[in-house]
Amino acid sequence: MIFTFGILHGANDLELIERIEHNKQFSFLKILLAYIILVVVSVVLFYKIPLLALLIFILVSAFHFGEQHWQDVLKGCNKIISGLFQFNYGILILTALFYFNSPEVKDIIYKIAHVTIAENYFFYFLIATFSFYIFLSFIIIKNSATFKFKILEQTFYIFILCLIFKVASLLLGFAIYFIFWHSIPSLHDQIKFLYGSYTFANFKKYFKSAFVYWIISLIGVFILYTLSKDMVIFDALFFSFLASITFPHFIIILKMYKN
């Protein structure tokens, strides 16, 4: 699932940034060079200061997930409150994933950053983020009638996700959320932004445009897999790889929604 829709949803970033910056005098090569530099910087950061890089990755991913999921619903809301809510929603999902798979997560964090985290910390983070989720929800409900019904539905889905995270492995639980709650909806938004509407014909255009970058990403994952000697090391390298391509993707999608 990650190799198909998961990687594909971030494989067309260069076309997106070309569309966003179409009025500015940036050539394709300049955009590509900037993208590659950002990826390389994130890789170096993971190599030199892995704990900081991992923390930034989690925070960036949290806002990215929350923004994609809620940006339509929260239009017209206070920007600070909506931004906090989006960020907290993403943190809540990730914290739930970490809590229900804490032994695997501890191993990966140790492999990446050489830091050991007590398992009860994940529980405390989960309670804190869920409490803040409820608090922010009550604030937004006062200013948005549609949000009242949406929040009930989405809270139900959070409990469904917790059940999935509990019975699935870390990678499978992440994949289910990443594909069905994030990647496919994000593909829908990107296609609408690029081509005006979501149709199968426009999906084929998107796929054709993203195909080369998708294949390059798959080759990169395959190289990581062949270099790793056990699954824990592969998980660590794989999440580091996802982080490296997430940083530029996050910036581009942020710009897309602003447009």
Image: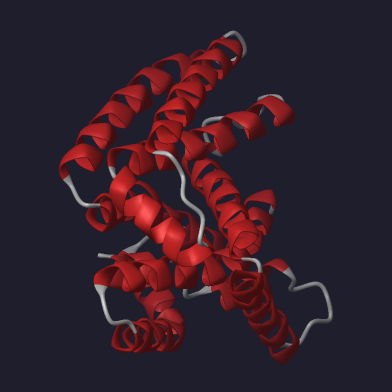
Q: Residue furthest right?
A: 25
The answer to whether 27 appears left or right of 222 in the picture is right
Residue 168 location (% of width, % of height): 18, 47
Q: Quadrant of residue 198?
A: bottom left
Q: Residue at x 36, y 27 (%)?
A: 154
Q: Is residue 209 above or below residue 240?
A: below
Answer yes or no: is residue 253 visible.
no
Q: Quadrant of residue 200?
A: bottom left
Q: Quadrant of the C terminus?
A: bottom right
Q: Residue at x 53, y 62 (%)?
A: 113
Q: Nearer the viewer, residue 114 or 226?
A: 114
Residue 229 location (% of width, % of height): 28, 82
The answer to whether 144 appears left or right of 106 in the picture is right
Q: Is residue 124 above or below residue 71?
A: above
Q: Nearer the viewer, residue 60 or 154?
A: 60
Answer yes or no: is residue 216 visible.
yes
Residue 127 location (% of width, % of height): 44, 22
Q: Residue at x 36, y 18 (%)?
A: 152
Residue 6 location (% of width, % of height): 36, 65
Q: Quadrant of the N terminus?
A: bottom left
The answer to whether 23 appears left or right of 206 in the picture is right
